[in-house]
Image: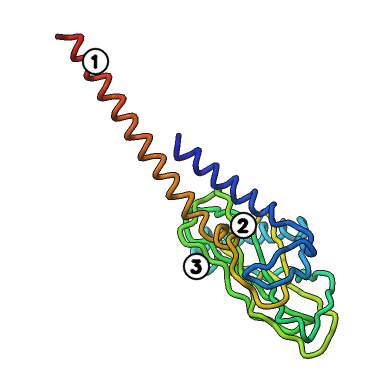
Amino acid sequence: MLQKFFVCASASLAIASFAAQAQDASLATPSRYGQNMVRSYELPATLIDRYNAAILEAIQSHAVSATPDSKEAFTPLDTWSGSAFGAGSHSGPYTLVVKVLGSAIEPTDLGARWQLSWNGQPGAIPGMDVPDARPGLPMQIAVASEPMDFKVDQNVLPSLKLLSAKNLRIERVRVEVWSGVGEESWLDWLLEWWPMLAGVLMWTALLLFLRFERKKAAKVTAEAEKRSI
């Protein structure tokens, strides 16, 4: 029961931290991704529904065909494009960050691959991978693109497409564009390490609870022995 409580607390923290980061770009403070947040977008719910339907279809196809890669192989869906922003030649580099709030469908590895472009020019962005994910437990996964410099001032249209995914149910997707060279902050450190910290706190509390229960049982046994004498 105590473990279930801490699992629920960890899930609530993931959801709360995702919601807390939904802020006006002008109010954002420097982070590991850059000095200034230029834009913040949310992918529409209709597109996320199509993502989830494609992922479930891939899982069902795997159950029928039992081919090793079918869980991650599905036809890429519509490309999402955000509103254009003004990119300066001297205010870069620019970094696009994809943050996903979601959960695993099955007790196995979780992953996703994205395709990024700036005004149609491809950009490099790493995949999302979580080994041995716990099904149904909300988590936030974030990946950042390789920084991009623009040689002339221009309006830039960021685009994103989900190429493949496995064992992932998506709740929300936020896309952020940052400018400048990033710097590590205490908030970045906390968001990165909170799952491990939550795990340590959970097991510490569990051990303390078991120790308390053992002492309580020993006391009851000792009192029962005294009464029997």
Locate residue 100: give its quadrant: bottom right
Q: Residue furthest bottom?
A: 151
Mark 3, other Cα within 10 Å: few <14 / some 14–19 / many ≥20: few
The residue drawn where x is 60% and y is 59% is 187
Q: Is residue 13 above or below residue 62?
A: above
Numbered tag placed on residue 67 in the rendering: 3
Distance between the alpha carbons at the discs numbered 2 and 3? 15 Å
**Is disc 1 in contact with disc 3, using a CB cutoff of under 8 Å?**
no
Residue 164 locus on image (x, y percent): 61, 69
Distance between mark 2 and mark 1 Cα atoms: 58 Å
Q: Secondary structure at mark 2?
A: helix
Q: Position of residue 218 (x, y in %)?
A: 25, 25
Three-letter code for the amino acid on which mark 1 is drawn: Glu
Residue at the spot of label 2: 56
Between disc 1 and disc 3, whose residue precedes? 3
Depth check: give the residue in front, 208 or 169.
208
Task: Identify the image quadrant of the C terminus.
Answer: top left
Look at label 2 and name its amino acid: Leu
Q: Earlier in the sequence, mark 2 or mark 3?
A: 2
Please tell me whether mark 3 sits on a helix, a strand or a loop: loop
- Nearer the observer: mark 1 or 3; the answer is 1
Q: Which residue is mark 1?
A: 223
User: Residue at left 55%, top 54%?
Assistant: 104
Task: Find the distance from the CA under tag 1 to the CA under tag 3.
Answer: 63 Å
Looking at numbered disc 3 in the image, what kind of residue is underneath it? Answer: Thr
Using a 10 Å C-alpha cutoff, classify the residue at mark 1 as few (fewer than 14 neighbours), some (14 to 19) or many (20 or more): few
